[in-house]
Amino acid sequence: MSARGKVRPCLARLAGAWRACAVLALLGALLLPTGDRQAYAAADAEAARACLAVAETNLLVPQGGWLRPSPAYADGNWLRDAFWTTSALGRRVGRVALDNFGRQLSPAGQAPTKLRVDGSGGAYDDDESTLLYIIWAYRDGGQPPGRLLRAWGWLRGHVTAGGYVTPPGNFHTWHDTLLFPQEGVAAYNQGLYVVAALAAVRLGLADEARAEAAAVFYRQLYRRDYGYMPVSLKLDYHDASALVGEVLARSLFDQAILSDEAVLNTVNSLPRAGDGFKVLTAGDGTYLPPTAFSPIFARGDYQNGGSWLLYDVLAWLAAAKAGSPKAEDLARQRLAEEAASGDLYEYTTTLPPGGPFRSVHPTYGWNAYACIALGLDGIPDASQVRRWAAWPTMY
């Protein structure tokens, strides 16, 4: 999600951004009628419109490919958010947006986490941004070979025996407030490293052996004794985003990395929050102490067990791709429920049990990928988007 400069203004704006809405109600009362294809079609169309709206609204400079994450974060352009959001805006926009980050690679090849409003590199956290840069370059193309070589070289400096090493501390993954007590391998980052390595093979940057070594390490993160893939090699927390790399590998390359059993067990183990999941929890399914995060967050809030639409949908989709007959419908229901509220939010709090819950930061752009992942109709090619001329600019 965010980065150092993004979380801190977030804290000051939370009170004004929260909106009460009836989300995360009991699953049985909310499922669309089985076999009612008209209901599904109507919900899908509404969700597709919402996805496109959040993507369009946050593309502030169409010709320049400048995106903000949401109106709550108007002070910069984050690579991870732009990666997901541009999926709904077409390859042409994706290439232009990616080039903004490519031009700001560090001399060593690290992609910026965030660009300032003037387009310069605003933050270079040691996180997944460079992994996503390589994946994005494969997806949309257009990056010069020299940049790709530098970025791939920076990534290789993080790899030991196929494992992508995440430093201790915070601001190292999308769950940027999570504190890693020591150096290790985070499942989310490792999954993205597998996808980046597969992309690097196709971009002529790496050989198959390097991609296979990354895949082998990702498989080893699954713990049969736990019955799920934990957040990292050294932490047993449940993580709804641990399978993001698996979803991208199966979507971009039609290639499974993990066994179907590992995927299904991991998704089935995730503590539920209505139609979605609590994004991070302890191994026993309870909330983590606030001190497991920096800045600290109360139980059920933000990354301490909040429900995040993007990662809920991707977790269900991972299960669907692994053979679950109901998971795709559950993903669509999670998306449809939120779209019915009139907007798509960054996340929803999950305490107290039974609500009331608070949906935080409306018009959150990266949720557009939920529709792309599910193959919903209604997302046009970039050339068909009609409202760009009326959008405000940042310059």
Image (spheres, helix red, strand yellow):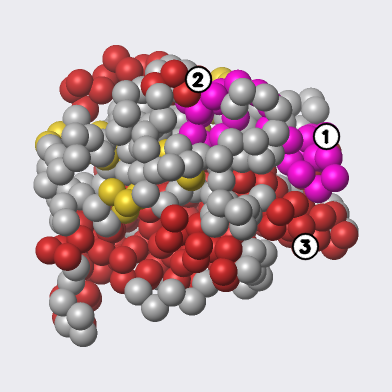
Residue 175 x %, y %: 49, 34
Is 333 drawn above or below residue 276 in the view shown?
A: below
Asked whether residue 395 appears in the rendered view, the answer is no
Residue named by callout 2: 4
Residue 178 x %, y %: 50, 28
Nearer-N-terminus badge (3/1)? 1
C-alpha gap between disc 2 and disc 3: 33 Å
Amino acid carrying mark 2 in the image: Arg
Residue named by callout 1: 157
Q: Nearer the viewer, mark 2 or mark 3?
A: 2
Magenta stretch in the rendered image: 154-179
- Compared across the picture, whether 318 is left or right of 108 comes to left
- Residue depicted at x 59% and y 36%: 235
Res 202 label: 3
Amino acid carrying mark 1 in the image: Gly
- Compared across the picture, whether 220 is left or right of 239 comes to right
Amino acid carrying mark 3 in the image: Arg
Q: Predominant secondary structure in magenta?
A: loop
